[in-house]
Image (spheres, rainbow, N blue to C red):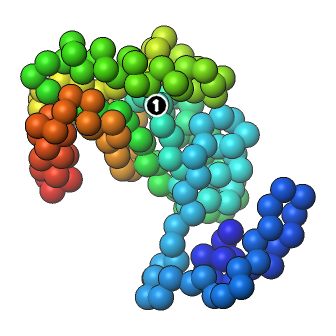
Amino acid sequence: MRRLVETGTADFHGELLTAAPPLPAAVPGSEPPVPILVAAMGPQALRVAGQLADGILPLLAGPRALAEHIVPAVTAAARAAGRPAPRIVAFVPGVVTADPGAVREAATETLAFYERFPSYQRVIELSGGTRAADLAVIGDEETVAAEVRRYREAGATEVVFTATDLGGEADRRRTWKLLGELAHS
């Protein structure tokens, strides 16, 4: 993958993956090359991501799991491999709303899907939650801004909100407005 994003070519034929694009795949004008970000949360995936990738994309990993488990593991692996500190792009379901009860209920239903997977069960538990919806950031502007700060303090280099539609279009726009303000502050 690294060769593909850096040179635009690859010729890899593995047991489960083949990468041999028929045309150059470079992104013109991309300096530095397109970063390699990996969805990693478990110990082995974090070790490999730290050694080889430019960063990780944890989903449903709260500030506690990030600070105590995820960020230290991936950062130590990067350091041991002589690589720079990786980007930690935390994906967080969240909504700014005046009706947190209704949005929390929608989050419980929508995010329950993740509770079926051991990897998500583990990270939810490491975050201090019992259900995926426990990791959703839901509330007014002050509440959501405080939670975004907690993610940053826990080691997230970037925080990306998902599921911003849980409360409807007005809440989505309210959420985007706040996130835009936080990005420029």
Left or right position of 61 against 5: left
- Count the marks: 1
- Any part of residue 133 in sight: no
Say which element carries label 1. loop
Residue shown at 30%/14% (left/top)?
Answer: 105
Q: Quadrant of residue 107?
A: top left
User: 98 and 30: which one is in front?
Assistant: 98
Q: Residue at x 39, y 50 (%)?
A: 157
75 w.r.t. 135: above or below: below
Q: Where, by quadrant of the figure, is residue 17 drawn?
A: bottom right
- The amino acid on which the numbered mark 1 sits, given as a three-letter code, is Leu
Q: Is residue 65 visible?
A: yes
Image x and y of residue 168, in percent: 19, 33
Q: Nearer the viewer, residue 173 or 6?
A: 173
Q: Residue sitting at 55 percent across and 36 percent down?
A: 70
| Quadrant in which the N terminus appears | bottom right
Residue 185 vs 110, above or below: the answer is: below
Q: Left or right: 142 with respect to 32?
A: left
Of residues 102 and 146, the one nearer the viewer is 102
Identify which residue is drawn at 87% across, 63% down.
14
Q: Which residue is mark 1?
A: 60
Percent coordinates x, y for residue 3 in the rendering:
69, 77
Q: Is residue 117 left or right of residue 150?
A: right
Left/right placement of residue 137 relative to residue 57 reads left
**Residue 54 pos. (x, y %):** 56, 61
- Residue 91 horizontal/vertical position (percent): 41, 41
Q: Residues within 10 Å of mark 1 (few under 14, many from 20)?
A: many
